[in-house]
Amino acid sequence: MSNGEDLRVTIFDFIFGCRHERHSFPLTIRGRRRPIAASLTGTYVACLDCGKEFPYDWAEMRVLSAKERRKLITRIHSERRV
Ligand SMILES: [Zn+2]
């Protein structure tokens, strides 16, 4: 079993997203075990068609763009490496 591999796949999905447009109501997660999507902003939405999760910005009332997600992921990764 390779967790590193799983993480890469998740992040790939994350950056490129999915083609569906129906998302759940934004969910805010507090606590230690957050989905990756929620670890970026604390809030995420799930795709109602394929179940993928995307970080959601409450302040902007929208899902983060691919560019924003990439930036946040890069930041999280550099923090975790320390
Ligand atoms: Zn989808």
Image (cartoon, rainbow, N blue to C red):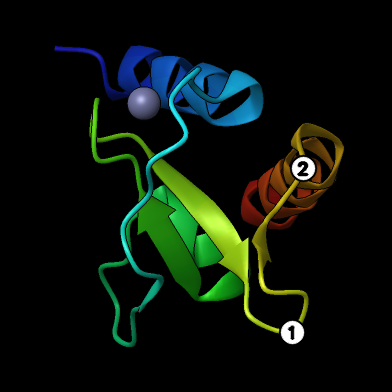
Other-residue count near label 1 (Cα within 10 Å), few / some / many at <14 / 14–19 / ≥20: few
**Of pointers 1 and 2, the one earlier in the residue sequence:** 1
Q: CA distance from mark 1 to mark 2?
A: 14 Å
Q: Is mark 1 within 8 Å of ligand 1?
A: no
Given the image, on which type of amino acid does mark 2 rest? Answer: Ser
The residue wearing badge 1 is: 59
Which amino acid lies under the numbered mark 1 shown in the image of this protein? Ala
Residue assigned mark 2: 65
Say which element carries label 1. loop
Q: Nearer the viewer, residue 16 or 82?
A: 16
Q: Quadrant of the C terminus?
A: bottom right
Q: Are marks 1 and 2 in contact (CB under 8 Å)?
A: no
Residue 46 is marked as: none
At x 33% / y 40%, what residue is drawn? 47
Q: Residues within 10 Å of mark 2 (few under 14, many from 20)?
A: some
Q: Quadrant of the N terminus?
A: top left
Mark 2 residue element:
loop
* Among the 4 quarters of the image, the one containing residue 6: top left
Q: Locate residue 30, reporting x and y percent.
A: 33, 87
Q: Quadrant of ligand 1?
A: top left
